Image: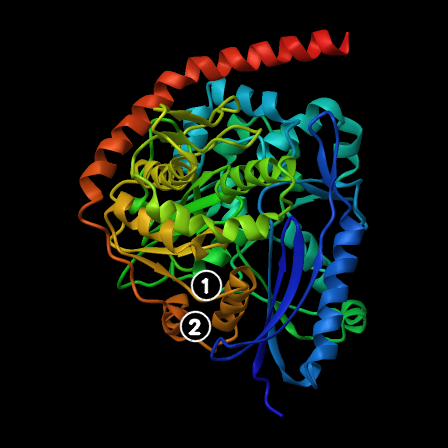
């Protein structure tokens, strides 16, 4: 039997999945399990590194037991996972305590010190990426300040996918996408001594492994890991880019002809534009966003909203609580099922909603941990349906805000993620961006993108563009055109949205101070 299957391993924050695809991109089988992490009252969000590997290995073993002769048919594997965070190991490759996840808030002051320091401009111009508390570069500063003994015992600082890659292959390498956005220069795609010095991390330079691009480099599956997961020793394994980028690859980001934008509306909102080279990257005065290296000379320029579908979940939870209080029990899924009909019948632009519902504030296209959600424009004519529509419109306005920070909005927008299943949200997004929007019928985009990288490295395709033509274009749905009747209204609403968030900023900080004072008094 020929080697006709590619495997994608995607270790997300909440779920770890192993997925098998044939060479045409058809999904053959998936094995998934809930991931686990621990939250602490001090802002800590940590994950057990050994358990993460054990869960990933179990999913790969389950996949090999599901597909007949997967060991004989597997051609290559691509590995991706949650971005940011810090996963430390010692000289024997053993974890040094739990990993710090991207959700961890303890490096807040360290990130602020970097952005207020003299080297911030050097860092931003080289990496084209804003500094956030979730990134390894801020978390290493926090560890340097609070736990120097742990750092002293560390031999390497990895990300989630790099830890799993090490367990699979024994290789200690860094993925080009995250290595460069943290510590590198986008033009050289290598570590930058100037950036590392500006971060005040010169003494930790030895923790950073060599950089590889998974579309060009593979390592072999080691014997011990092969026995544990049921796949053959020597199987080529490729280190994929961070998960938001592999999801983008599987959703059409690398289409060189259309060069679309991509909005992934999951729990968070990820808005990406394709840049063919470093000269096409657009910097912004707020020094925010991510710039992620792709295969060849290309980049994905990214702005991320902390909360996308979380806003919809929040308002659905309010509806559920009201129904329960009235003796009419219902779950969130039943409530969400009726939202599209309500939104379709509601008055457009009745209210303005700023969708900063996450307790960690906002990071794109501006960074402010105190940012909070709000409705403005409420009066007696506003009903429940208008509030729902306001939330949907707020998500679309936030997407437009992100694309505006990256230059001209791409000619076409691809959309993925759970919230993209709403026909009304897609309709509103198209009208707000004044661009056609196309959904992609791909369930496991992160794993698919990792498998596409492995397909390029193994020679199935000569480039990600060729892989896109085979794996993505057949799954594109018909475009939803912008509504010409809504366009002028949404142009005005967007101006109000931008003006409103600027005016609200002092109030956010005042509320944060009041909340801290109230908490202290309550504890006392």
User: Looking at the rendering, which quadrant does residue 111 occupy?
Assistant: top right
Image quadrant in which the C terminus is located: top right
Q: Is residue 287 left or right of residue 490?
A: right
Q: Is residue 479 left or right of residue 454?
A: left
Residue located 31% across and 27% down the image: 498
Compared with 390, 414 (above or below) is below
> Taking 372 as reference, is 105 left or right?
right
The residue where tag 2 is placed is 471
For this view, does 369 lie left or right of residue 480? right
* Residue 474 location (% of width, % of height): 38, 74
- Tell me whether circle 1 and circle 2 mark residues in contact (CB < 8 Å): yes
Q: Is residue 351 above or below residue 514?
A: below
- Residue neighbourhood size for the residue with mark 1, other residues' Cα within 10 Å, grouped as few (<14), some (14–19), many (≥20): many
Q: Residue at x 53, y 31 (%)?
A: 132
Q: Assess disc 2: are there few (<14), some (14-19) or many (≥20) residues with their C-alpha within 10 Å of its C-alpha.
A: many
Query: Is residue 232 something one can see in this rendering?
Result: no
Identify the residue under disc 1: 250
């Amino acid at each position: 039997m020929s080697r006709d299957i590619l495997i994608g391993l995607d270790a997300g924050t909440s779920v770890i999945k192993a997925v098998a695809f044939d060479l045409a991109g058809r999904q053959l089988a998936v094995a998934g399990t809930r991931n686990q992490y621990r939250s602490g009252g001090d802002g800590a969000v940590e994950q057990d590194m050994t358990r993460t590997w054990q869960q990933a290995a179990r999913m790969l073993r389950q996949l090999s037991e599901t597909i007949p002769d997967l060991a004989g048919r597997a051609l290559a594997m691509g590995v991706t996972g949650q971005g940011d965070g810090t996963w430390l190991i010692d000289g024997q490759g053993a974890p040094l305590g739990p990993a710090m996840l991207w959700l961890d808030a303890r490096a807040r002051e360290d990130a602020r010190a970097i952005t207020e320091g003299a080297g911030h401009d050097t860092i931003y111009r080289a990496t084209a990426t804003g500094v956030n508390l979730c990134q390894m570069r801020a978390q290493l500063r926090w560890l340097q300040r609070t736990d120097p003994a742990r750092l002293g015992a560390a031999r390497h600082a990895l990300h989630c996918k790099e830890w799993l890659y090490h367990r699979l292959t024994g290789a200690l390498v860094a993925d080009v996408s995250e290595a460069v956005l943290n510590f590198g220069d986008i033009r050289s795609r290598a570590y930058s001594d100037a950036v590392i010095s500006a971060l005040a991390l010169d003494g930790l330079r030895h923790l950073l492994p060599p950089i590889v691009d998974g579309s060009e480099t593979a390592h072999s599956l080691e014997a011990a890991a092969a026995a544990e997961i049921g796949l053959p020793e020597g199987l080529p394994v490729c280190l994929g880019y961070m998960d938001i980028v592999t999801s983008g690859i599987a959703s059409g980001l690398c289409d060189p002809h259309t060069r679309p934008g991509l909005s992934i509306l999951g729990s968070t909102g990820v808005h990406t534009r394709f840049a063919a080279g470093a000269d096409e990257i657009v910097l912004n005065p707020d020094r925010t966003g991510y710039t992620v290296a792709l295969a060849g000379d290309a980049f994905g320029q990214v702005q991320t909203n902390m909360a996308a579908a979380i806003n919809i979940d929040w308002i659905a939870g309010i509806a559920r609580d009201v129904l329960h209080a009235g003796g009419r029990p219902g779950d969130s899924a039943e409530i969400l099922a009726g939202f599209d009909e309500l939104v379709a019948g509601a008055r457009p632009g009745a209210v303005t909603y700023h969708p900063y519902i996450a307790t960690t504030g906002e990071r794109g296209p501006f960074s402010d941990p105190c940012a909070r959600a709000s409705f403005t424009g409420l009066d007696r004519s506003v009903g429940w349906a208008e509030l729902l529509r306001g939330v949907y419109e707020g998500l679309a306005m936030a997407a437009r805000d992100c694309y505006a920070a990256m230059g001209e909005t791409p000619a076409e927008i691809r959309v993925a993620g759970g919230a993209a299943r709403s026909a009304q949200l897609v309709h509103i997004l198209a009208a707000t961006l004044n661009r056609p929007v196309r959904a992609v019928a791909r369930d496991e985009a992160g794993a698919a993108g990792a498998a596409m990288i492995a397909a390029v490295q193994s020679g199935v395709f000569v480039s990600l563009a060729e892989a896109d033509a085979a794996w993505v274009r057949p799954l594109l749905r018909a475009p939803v055109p912008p509504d010409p009747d809504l366009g002028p209204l949404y142009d005005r609403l967007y101006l109000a949205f931008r003006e409103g968030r600027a005016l609200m900023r002092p109030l956010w900080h005042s509320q944060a101070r009041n909340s801290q004072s109230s908490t202290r008094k309550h504890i006392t």
